[in-house]
Amino acid sequence: MKFGIHVSIAGGIENAPLNAHKRQADTFQMFSRSPRGGKPTYTKDSIEEFKKRCQEYGFDECYIHTPYYINLASSTSRILKGSITSIREELEIGTQLGVTGVMTHLGSSKDYTRKEAIDLVVKGIDEIMKGYKGTTQLLIENAAGAGQIMGDTFEEIGYILKKVKYKNVGVCLDTCHAFASGYDIRTKASLDKTVTDFDKHIGLDKLKLFHMNDSKVELDSHKDRHEVIGKGFIGEKAFATFINHPKLKNISAILETPDVGEEKIPSLKLVKKLKK
């Protein structure tokens, strides 16, 4: 398992691998634009410098997170079309940069029945992937389950992936979000059950990345509150079991913990120590 962090692209996209290297990360995640919107604009030189630094620092994988406004179940045409366009742009940009995957939340729906919203999400993903020939993979991230959020259960994500025409779509599993949605990973037995449930409904072959975060709130809280690894309700012992689980240990993890902006990152130091 490689351990990475979310890094800033302040000053240029080419600074992302440098920022990750300075903090001793094995891989990294970034926004390719402002998380609140706008279009990403890169020069040929900045793209080449990004790729050069990835090679120089030994990053053979890295990831892009889509902007916050993404909603593939929106009843507002502008938001829905903008979400589809933005995700496709991220995949194309990711291909230019040599990025491994683009992860996205699916959004939420208050104006449709659950089935209507799911069908809209499936249609949106098919539109995103139509004619796409790039190398960067689209990853669906599980949600914490607040309100009418989409993709908070393994059953729902699995159903969506089965309905989508394009099969090269994977999953990014966030530990905090899964815990918030009621998936207990605190003991070996409960983790085994969660892994079995994931495999049953989605398939472990679809699991491409983890977002590794502890939780500020208790199991099944349906609140997205990230905590420093070992300081939350999931706890250090659980992460030690998780990191070394035979079915999970070869999948990379990105930390989005509150301490990732610090010069020395306690969460990153701890997870590296826990790996056997």
Image: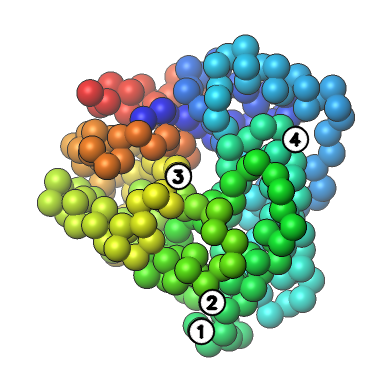
Answer left or right for 55 relative to 263: right
Q: Residues within 10 Å of mark 3 (few under 14, many from 20)?
A: many
Q: Are marks 2 and 1 in contact (CB under 8 Å)?
A: yes
Disc marking residue 208 = 3
Q: Say which of 206 and 85 sits in front.
A: 206
Q: Say which of 44 and 214 sits in front.
A: 44
> Dividing the picture into quarters, in which one does residue 75 lie?
bottom right
Q: Residue at x 70, y 66 (%)?
A: 127
Answer left or right for 121 relative to 85: left
Q: Nearer the viewer, mark 4 or mark 1?
A: 4
Answer left or right for 143 relative to 129: left
What amino acid does circle 4 point to?
Answer: Gln
Residue at disc 4, secondary structure: helix
Q: Are marks 4 and 3 in contact (CB under 8 Å)?
A: no
Q: Please state the horizontal and vertical placement of residue 53, each as a whole percent of the image.
A: 67, 17
* Residue at image mark 2: 118
* Residue at image mark 1: 115
Disc marking residue 96 = 4
What amino acid does circle 3 point to?
Answer: Lys
